[in-house]
Structures are given as structure tokens and as C-alpha cells.
Amino acid sequence: MLYSITNGTLSLKASSRGAEMYSLMKDGKEYLWTADPEYWPEHAPVLFPFIGRERNGEYRTGGRTYSMPIHGFAKNMDFEPEEISGEELRFTIRDTETTREVYPFPFLFTVAYRLEGNTVKVSFIVKNTGDSELYFMAGGHPGFLCPPPSHPGSPRSACGISFLREGKPLDAVYSTPITAEGLAASKEKEPYVFVQKDGRIIPEADLFANDALITENWDCDEVDLLDPDGRPYIRVSFDAPLVGVWSVAGREAPYICIEPWWGRCDREDFAGELKDREWEQALAPGKTAVYSFAINIPD
């Protein structure tokens, strides 16, 4: 079921299925990807409790081996609308017999959307309802129209992507290589380097030939999409250790995803326990953690 909020500037629709945004409009114009199945049939899936894939399709914890769907199970679950007001939506799931078959942890997971002027604040709220450490990852995967609605008919390559830190474009983006199996390459492999010319990278068809561009270690705290005139029309800001930027490979598909992550896929040579995974989040019994990012549509 779809739920809607507006603050007079922005209008947002989100579904109880996966707590996924379905629409984000400003001044009557759509900015969120429309889930055209010709390219990618999703709008903005929520990633929990895993991001990406596990090595060999399995992970180990508590003396047992489990398998988790790519990006976790939350995006395929029905959430309960917990709180709905004029400018905020909240959706919640908790562990069930089904989730415990692939993920043996009690939890409460809430996704919140709040409109603040030209900005949507997206929050993932994780509570450990069990009596042992909770291990998880969380992240967003929103897709945005590229080119923007202000430039219909323009090619995607007329636009730009800008990676920034503390308000300044990076000179270059150092991206974690992804293997053909969808895993992060071993640490011995050098990152891909994308030079930002005039503070931008052009999203040509071959930009995502090696999967997403992924920065780590808080190298970046904002990613902007630039219209053909060089003006930002989407600004995603975050305090996440990683961010992925992605679109389908080999085509100038008319969307770009900007994905703040608290976690990522396994390395190709990882052989440890769940608690040893890189960027795995840990939460003590009874504790709550909040992870947030903001989507701004500038004037």
C-alpha cells in the first residue's frame, strides 16, 4: 500500500512493501526513478540486514552457516506503518520465524522519511531486541532521473556526477573494484581511479562497466547530480563510511543511483565469521542505532 506526505514544496510516496520510496516530486515534477523494467525495476530499495553478496553465497555465525539474499530481506517484506503525519512516514518490521531461518537475530527495524523544506531526511533505526550482540548492515539505494525533468530529451552524458567532501569536489574518486561474482576485490588490488574534471564525472554508457563506483573510509560525504547546465539538481549528503553510485552497465539508462551504505559485500578472499566482515555494524542488547542521509532538491 502506498502512503503520501507533502510539505507544500516536496511530495513523497512510499510503499509499505519494503518501505520503498515510489515518488519524490517538487513543483509537480518527478525526480525519483520510475522503475521502468527495461532498465531497472525498482525505485529506491532499502538494504537490511546485509548489503551486497556474501562470498560463496553464505555466511557463518553461532556455529552455523546461512545464506542471505542479495541486499538482505527487508526490501521484500511488508512493513507496518508505525506513524504517519503530514510531513513524516515511518515503517517498521521485526524478526519473524521466516527471517530467523536466514538471520538468527531478534531486531526491530524502522525506516523513517521526513520532509524538511527542499530535503527528505531518510533514517534507518535499528534496535537490538535480543540478549546477544546484533550484527547487521543498512543502506539506501535510491535511483534518480538522469537527465532531470528540467531537461527532457537530453542525453544522460550531458549531465554530471560530483563527489564532494566538506563542500569541495574531490580531485579523483578511488573506487573499490568489484569482481564478476559481485564481491569486493582483495585489498592487494588497486582501486579504480576516476578523475573529476571540472569537479565532475560524465555518466557515459561505459562508466559502470565494472559495476558501481564505491568510495570507502568516509572519503566522500556528498554526491550531486548535475544538469546539462552544470547546476546540481539532486544532492545526497550523508555521514556513511561508504557510498555507491550505480546504473545498469553498458547503456545510458536514464537514471543514476546514489547509495549511502553502512556496510558492503564480502571481499573475494574473505573466510571469517559474520562479526569479522568489513564494515559490519554491531549493536549491544537493548541498544538502538540511527543511520541517516538527506536528499535535497536545490532551488
Image: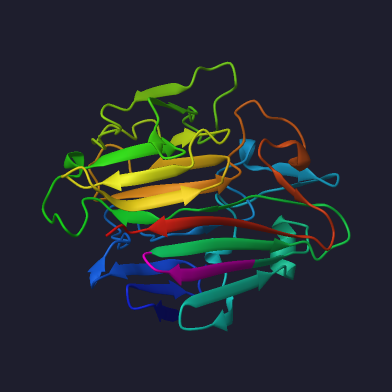
**Is residue 117 found inside the magenta-colored segment of the image?**
yes
Residue 120 locus on image (x, y percent): 44, 64
Side of 221 where 23 appears, left or right: left
Residue located 57% across and 67% down the image: 111
Q: Is residue 68 above or below residue 125?
A: above
Residue located 30% across and 69% down the image: 25
Residue 90 locus on image (x, y percent): 56, 74
Q: How many marks?
A: 0
Q: Is residue 24 above or below residue 269?
A: below
Foreground: 46 or 221?
221
Q: Quadrant of residue 196?
A: top left
Residue 169 locus on image (x, y percent): 37, 33
**Is residue 159 found inside the magenta-colored segment of the image?**
no
Side of 69 where 228 appears, left or right: left
Residue 115 locus on image (x, y percent): 44, 70
Foreground: 35 or 14?
14
Q: Main secondary structure of the magenta part?
A: strand
What scheme was used to colour the molecule? rainbow
Q: Quadrant of residue 36?
A: bottom left
Furthest residue in direction right, as rendered: 131
Q: Quadrant of residue 56?
A: top right
Residue located 53% across and 17% down the image: 189
Q: Is residue 190 above or below residue 252?
A: above
Residue located 67% across and 49% down the image: 67
Foreground: 185 or 19?
19
Side of 6 where 146 appears, left or right: left
Task: Please state the extent of the stretch shown in magenta in the rendering.
Answer: 110-118
Q: Is residue 226 visible?
A: yes
Q: Is residue 247 visible?
A: no
The quadrant of the image that shows the C terminus is bottom left
